[in-house]
Amino acid sequence: MIDLRSDTVTKPTEAMRKAAYQAEVGDDVYGEDPTINRLEELAAEKLGKEAALFVTSGTQGNQIAVLTHCKPADEVIMEANAHIFVYEGAAMSALAGIQPKTIDGDRGAMDPKQVASAIRPEDIHFPETGLISLENTHNKAGGTVVPLENMKAIKKVANQYKIPVHLDGARIFNAAVAMNEPVHKIAEQVDTVQFCLSKGLGAPVGSILAGPKEFIERARKWRKRLGGGLRQAGMIAAPGIIALNEMPNRLQEDHNHAKRLAEGLGNIDGIEIESEVETNMVLVSVENLGLTSEQFIEKLEKAGIKSGSYGTHSVRLVTNYDVSKEDIETVISKVNQLFK
Ligand SMILES: *Cc1c(COP(=O)(O)O)cnc(C)c1O
């Protein structure tokens, strides 16, 4: 099976498994797990932030950010297809008592002028704007890179109104590679960042939330309230250290594979590439094949290829560490055979 459903499907490497086995551990709720402490310090350093917190998932990291930045009845500004709006089960409403305010983006980027006009003035009728949330790379737009200038312009608006900015940087390392910038250059544009160790970086579990020291202290308490205070968690942090040190450098390979895949699939009659490939995702429309995404996915699955539905006729294929150059050629030739 060639699994292109997501970059979350990557299995830990041999080195990660050994590191987990050998990890030095302690009780992290007491702050005594040396491996967790090392991962948090390393992550903060890489992102250029004062402090970082290991969390169980990207969703938990984003939600802890919302809970820590906001109070109930606040409004959070976000892009209309943001993961935090579409794919987190309305957690911000359920847990933080937040009302989302969405803005349609262009390849995942919100217009700073629209962000400015979405900020609520003081009025007895209105909610208060508590946070602006960005996403880079933008998942639903097709792994698109939100330009640094766009992030900068939004941060400038946010500063004028003294509103914090959070980045859902689940794939911030893919964005950094695509921009050819160090990851801290992206993180610098926002107050807090969440990124996933368990996607393209290949770790088995976990995400990082990073930001100012005082913010991370309050976030740590929210993590505990949510039941996310872990004990000998060095076992899962040790692979995360390898993910952070060794895996960002190989993401370009995933991006090259995605470009090649889009080129190969785009040449097949009836398959349209929906979004120019910038990182590790390929979105295709199969409408002109006369198929729904579910029907297309089923045909591919029978040919040994897994992909994911992204709408009625939209299918997403994500390259990752466990998919080789040869696998990509196999996928292209099998899809060709199916639909020629
Ligand atoms: C995957 C993802 C998340 C959530 O991560 P989980 O670990 O699956 O909870 C958040 N934001 C974006 C953009 C993602 O792609």
Image (cartoon, rainbow, N blue to C red):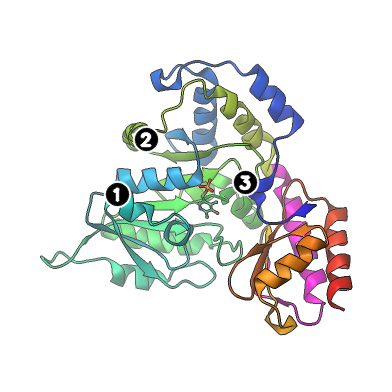
What label does residue 96 carry, if any? 1
Name the kind of residue labelled 2 in the image.
Answer: Ile
Identify the residue shown where x is 51% and y is 59%. 148
Distance of label 2 from label 1 (alpha carbons):
17 Å
The percent coordinates of residue 333 (x first, y second) are 88, 66
Give the residue at mark 2. 216
Name the kind of residue labelled 3 in the image.
Answer: Lys
Name the kind of residue labelled 1 in the image.
Answer: Ala
Range covered by the magenta-colored residues: 249-277
Give the SS element for disc 1: helix
For marks 1 and 3, give the one nearer the viewer: 1
For marks 2 and 1, give the one nearer the viewer: 1
Distance of label 3 from label 2 (alpha carbons):
23 Å
The percent coordinates of residue 227 (x first, y second) are 39, 33
Give the residue at mark 3. 199
Give the SS element for disc 2: helix
Sequence-wise first label, 3 or 2: 3
* Residue 250 visible at all: yes
Asked if the stretch drawn in magenta spans residue 318, the answer is no
For marks 3 and 2, give the one nearer the viewer: 3
Is residue 22 depicted above or below 184 in this figure? above
